[in-house]
Amino acid sequence: MSLREQLDLRSAEDAHLVLRRATVLDPASGIDSVHDVVIQGGEIAALASPGEAETNGAEVIEAEGLHAFPAFFDPHVHLRTPGHEHKEDVETGTRAAAAGGYCGILAMANTEPPVSTAADISALREQARAGASVPVGFLATVTKDMQGAELTEMVELREAGAVGFSDDGLPIVDAGVMRRALQYQHLCGGNIALHEEDPRLSLGGAMHEGPVSAALGIGGIPSVSESTMVARDAALAGYENARIHVQHLSAAESVEIVRAAKAAGVQISAEASPHHLCLTDEEVRALDPHSSKMNPPLREERDRQALIEGLRDGAIECIATDHAPHQPEEKDVPFEQAAFGVTGLETAFAALHTELVLPGTIDLGLLVERMAGGAEPFDLPRPTLAPGSEANVVLCDLGAEWTVGEDGYESRSANSWCAGRTLTGRVLMTVAAGQVVFRLRSFSLGVAA
Amino acid sequence: MKHLLSIEQLSRAEIEAILDRAESFAEVGRRDIKKVPTLRGRTVVSLFYESSTRTSSSFDLAAKRLSADLVSVKAAGSSVEKGESLKDTVATLSAYDPAVIVIRHPYAGAAQMVAGWTEAAVVNAGDGKHEHPSQALLDVYTLRRRLGSLDGVRIWIVGDVLHSRVARSNLIAFAKMGAELTVCGPPTLIPRGIEELGCDVSYSLDGIEEAEVVYALRMQNERMSESFVPSLREYAACFQIDTRRLNPRQLLMHPGPVNRGVELSGEAIDSPQSLIAEQVAAGLVVRMAILYELLAGGDASTPAAEGEGSHPTPIGTSA
């Protein structure tokens, strides 16, 4: 199975490329050496010895010194359509994904109205076939209109093509409703992705509860507002022998609970976001909602370290951006009034490469593996560079420095948490489902010359 | 000093410079004609998104005593009620080319954001539960007049610390001035991690006899419905400062407005050891000093100088 078959995108011509002398790294497939990567007919046609691949009319890209990885997969993106197309839509959001090196994304259902019916799913899939740069899958809500009360028609939604389910943006507060959804999963299939937060514990909060919130006088969102719900749902999933995916882990306690649940045999997967892996609540001291207001909030250094440890030992199998576009009106306001959320698709790899790989905190191979780890929890094929597999490739220059936002964004919104930062490592080209979906302008000009 | 956004931003020396300036304005206040020409021709905008008696009236009067033109905007009755954003309101008011914008806002960081949107100097007159620097300065001023110095002085701040910007600014200011600090209140109203601001935490009044200064905070009625405390009666039983709990050598302070019979007994408020009225009086001269430091702080002449002797230096050139 391939992403092209299982998800939707605008179809274009299959690429015919030779990435000459690229450093190919795909730890999940045990590949780590220099090759000519031949892409043809939608597939990785061959990994030839360096300099030896036949051209056969292909476009040749001199990739010596550049890295080819399996393209990334983001299971947590807000495309904002329907209802908030002034922030993002299928076209701009998937363009941002392509620019970030992604070959597939999953769109959240907390739109206006929420994606709760088969007709909603069908309409979105139609849009994706018309305008999505990269394969995109749509989740449907677990409960009708995210009210947390009644289940959606999950069987019909699955038949219409919903990849899975999530009320992301809101937790499923009622444990009884959560349990019914897990029971019903045995009929409808599809993973259930969970935004874990006890709203009574986070009430009135705008940042992590701790010494920084005490100093700033801003209402706190305690780490237990997340961890208690992760514990509840891990217990329910175990009891019902059902499957859950925990979104945007932020607290050390939550990582520990996921790790313990996995050890106990619970079918649970988890993601962490680049901003939680790179920043702590110290960032909030500047009171700039653009860079530091998101839910779950940036937490303390011990939490950040626990997330990194979770990446290392597999408690957390994937990195997900929680790309959450907002317009300036929602961010150019005092911190507590500002909307939660930051964009991340265009900067995730570069930010994590700069903040975690270059200082030696994690290996490049681990980052590459986790960036592509978001497909499998949703029964989608993991992007790989193994010959014969669907061509999902990202070509990066790990030495390139660039300043985020300098050349604008592909996304319709500019609320990047790393706006203005200088990052090292840049996506030059993305191939998704066999098609070239992104080329950095300066890079493509260079090729033409 | 370009803006006064927080106590955090000030050094002890800067705090002392403002207080020294306030002393000289106190002298002006004892004259028959209490007005000086320092800020003649300059415009001060006071923009209040929250109700206020003390802070807004003393900033307004401070501006007038310094001969500035004053525009007071209250959220109620202004375009704010029509949904105008803070950014747009500030842009509108900035069109009058004010020298200073004094802002009170219900959310943390508002004054700092405004400082990024205007050429005017910005004074934070309270931003959410974050900071209230002019209150802290007037409280330090009041104590300094009474005690000479805060070095080694033990101060207990008692009450709803969680919701209090005064508590935060005062903790920072008192610590910078060398005081030893304890915050005291029910555990539900003491923010987690507050000790990292450099204070001890006590969940009861036991030990308050060690304090030379007791600083009580306002207890708001709605805290009961949010179940921070079971009842005001129980709160008062545990934390009210009354003359029985206060020993005669201790000084009592409160930022106002007081809930009589809740955080303070009526007797304590009216006792000779209460500095509450002095705090209000200090508010005027300290706020005059703040406006002066922002607009004319680089000028060596005293604000009390008569006539045209004190031409203000341009904004941004002060130390």
Image: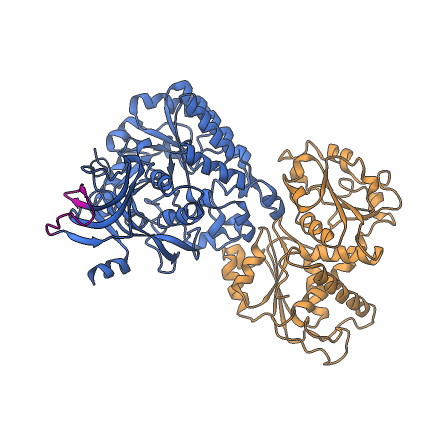
Chain colours: A blue, B orange
Q: Residue at x 67, y 38 (%)?
A: B189
Residue closest to the far left: A56
Q: Quadrant of residue A329?
A: bottom left
Q: Nearer the viewer, residue A264 or B226?
A: A264
Please tell me which residue lies in front, A349 or B53.
A349
Q: Residue at x 73, y 80 (%)?
A: B309
Q: Is residue B284 above or below residue A296?
A: below
Where does the C terminus of chain A fall, quadrant-wise?
bottom left
A24 vs B217, left or right, is: left
Compared with A194, B267 (above or below) is below
- Is residue A196 in view from this perspective? yes
Q: Is residue B266 left or right of residue B132?
A: right
Left or right: residue B316 compared with residue A368: right
Looking at the image, is A150 positioned above or below residue B10?
Answer: above
Is residue A195 something one can see in this rendering? no
Say if the magenta span includes residue A354: no
Residue B111 in the image, given as x and y percentages of width and height: 58, 58
Q: Quadrant of the N terminus of chain A?
A: top left
- Which stretch appears magenta? A38-57
